[in-house]
Image (tube, grey):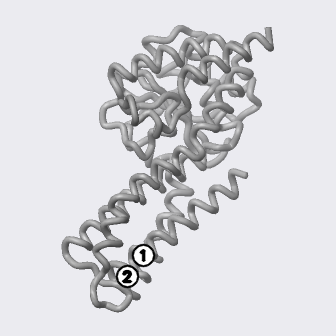
Amino acid sequence: MNTLKTVFFMTLMMVLLIFVGGFIGGQSGMMIAFVIAIGMNFVSYWFSDKIVLKMYKAQQVDANSSPKLYQMVEELAHNAKLPMPKVYVIENATPNAFATGRNPNNAAVAVTTGILRILNTQELAGVVAHELAHIKNRDILIGSIVATFAVTISLIANMAQWAMIFGGRGNNDEGGNPIVALLMIILAPIAATLIQLSISRSREYMADETGAQISGVPLALASALDKLSRANEIQPIQNAKPATAHMFIVNPLRGGGFSKLFSTHPPMGERIARLKTLAQKIG
């Protein structure tokens, strides 16, 4: 299923870029956009994980530089029957974490320095297990692809805006339709959000359950989620990118009221309730 989703998003990215290229530059614009789309698909598949890690200035650690964290990841990866992922730490006081990579053999787990400070050992193990669950469930590639896709959507909106300001060239080389450009500017960010929503919420529920099974402490994960949610509401991650918000274990962006309806993450109360029910089932 994730393979089909990946192909779908990469194809849709190409179609959108070609459409915008045609709207702005006619046939020549379509050809340029086609080349750009091919390049972006290549980059998003092979390098999207590296782009996200660099975006948040993540630093790789090992058994010498961060022995406790590294050993924890190693033990939990063994429990999950996964290859040892690379481990990264992000210098940020806000507690959060995410996983990225194109497959279990090329995966990475990243945590902020804030999460290492506020969680106890079992809670941190629950969070790490959650991220390993994303790897085990093979949905980290689609998460990275969607992040790239969302950035592309924003690029499309900007391209349409500049085309409207300076007079884009349509397929008839007589100028682009300003109404179409305006619609793209308005609808592109909404489309990006809906795309993230469509895959993110179900992935988080599944990762919570699988992660609880890997760590064996669903209540510790529930406690960690409660702490992380409260901390991110008070102080969201600075410079967090909306295009990558769905990759984090809790939403790194501040939002309340109506905006919660468009959150890339399920309601925290529901996630915690499900983990408590799971804890009762497994005793």
Secondary element at image label 2? helix
Is there any visible trace of residue 142 in the rendered image? yes
Query: Relative to residue 125, is residue 89 drawn left or right?
Result: left
Query: Relative to residue 49, is residue 59 drawn left or right?
Result: left
Is there any visible trace of residue 67 in the rendered image? no
Query: Relative to residue 159, is residue 141 drawn left or right?
Result: right
| Number of marks in the rendered image | 2
Furthest residue in direction right, as rendered: 282
Camera-side residue of 186 and 38: 186
Camera-side residue of 212 and 105: 212
| Disc number placed over residue 76 in the picture, else none | none
Q: Residue at x 76, y 10 (%)?
A: 280
Camera-side residue of 154 and 64: 154
Question: What percent of the width, then of the height, locates residue 221?
Answer: 61, 16
* Amino acid bearing label 1: Ala
Q: Is residue 202 above or below residue 124?
A: below
Question: What percent of the width, then of the height, locates residue 122?
Answer: 60, 10
Q: Are marks 1 and 2 in contact (CB under 8 Å)?
A: yes
| Disc number placed over residue 33 in the picture, else none | 1
Neighbour tally class for label 2: few under 14, some 14-19, many 20 plus, Cα within 10 Å: many
Neighbour tally class for label 1: few under 14, some 14-19, many 20 plus, Cα within 10 Å: many
Camera-side residue of 143 and 58: 143
* Amino acid bearing label 2: Gly
| Disc number placed over residue 29 in the picture, else none | 2
Q: Is residue 80 above or below residue 26?
A: above
Question: What percent of the width, then of the height, locates residue 263?
Answer: 47, 37
Secondary element at image label 1? helix
Q: Is residue 275 above or below residue 170?
A: above
Marks 1 and 2 sit apart, C-alpha to C-alpha, by 6 Å
Q: Residue at x 33, y 22 (%)?
A: 235
Q: Is residue 91 above or below residue 123?
A: below
Q: Residue at x 44, y 48 (%)?
A: 51
